[in-house]
Image (cartoon, helix red, strand yellow):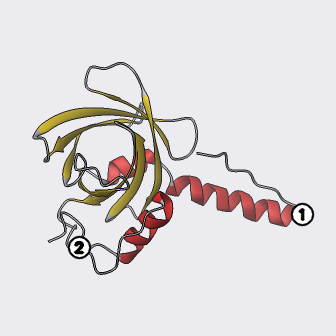
Amino acid sequence: MGTLALFAVVAACSANAAASAEVNEDKLDPFKLWSAFPDAIAVTSSTHSRLFECAEVTRLALDTDSKTADYDFYFASTGRRMTFHLAEGDSPGSVIFTVGSDPNPSTAAFYYSDFKTCAVISMKFIGNECILLVKKGLNESLPESCIDNYEEDCGVEIPKDSKLPCID
């Protein structure tokens, strides 16, 4: 993910840009996302990977001091479970994670969330995946903004007449 740079010509513009940067950083706060999403369903991925299709995600732990979280991923397509250990990265929206007992870290990026219904994340796990997560129980009433942000952030298009997996 690129570094956010702000250029200002006058002091008033600088103040507005700084306020805007704070809002953007808050919108990209992984810990805020983890706090808002105790469980979710991976509705679709940019590579159309069957691995992530309808994967169930359940938070196992949330540590407010270290700003870390553990999630259980249940991959319905394979019947396997994996625990993902997540920590905030160095820049807004960045996440460092490990899987199971493997100590080798990988990276993820958090692109969008309304903190009520959905989130768009990208992760390096068996390739690069950009995933639309939907809060469990809300997958039947997915707002158009979730789909729009997923398409824009992941560079994919979901045909308007197609039915997303896991959406009843």
Measured as percent of width and height from the top left, residue 150 is found at: 42, 63
Secondary structure type for disc 2: loop
Measured as percent of width and height from the top left, residue 79 is found at: 10, 40
Quarter holding the N terminus is: top right
Q: Is residue 156 left or right of residue 8?
A: left
Q: Is residue 21 left or right of residue 121?
A: right
Amino acid carrying mark 2 in the image: Lys
Q: Residue at x 81, y 56 (%)?
A: 7
Q: Residue at x 23, y 73 (%)?
A: 163
| Pointers 1 and 2 in contact (C-beta within 8 Å) | no
Q: Nearer the viewer, residue 81 or 164?
A: 164
> In this rendering, which labeled residue sits more in front, label 1 or label 2?
2
Answer above or below: position of 45 versus 63: below
| Number of dots carrying numbers | 2
Corner quadrant of residue 161: bottom left
Circle 2 is placed at which residue position? 163
Q: Earlier in the sequence, mark 1 or mark 2?
A: 1
Q: Residue at x 28, y 50 (%)?
A: 49
Q: Residue at x 72, y 57 (%)?
A: 18
Q: Nearer the viewer, residue 54 or 18?
A: 54
Secondary structure type for disc 1: loop
Q: Nearer the viewer, residue 31 or 49?
A: 49
Corner quadrant of residue 20: bottom right
Q: Residues within 10 Å of mark 1 (few under 14, many from 20)?
A: few
Measured as percent of width and height from the top left, residue 91 is found at: 58, 40
Circle 1 is placed at which residue position? 10
Q: Residues within 10 Å of mark 2 (few under 14, many from 20)?
A: few
Amino acid carrying mark 1 in the image: Val
Q: Residue furthest right?
A: 10
Q: Nearer the viewer, residue 114 or 53?
A: 53
Answer above or below: position of 33 versus 71: below
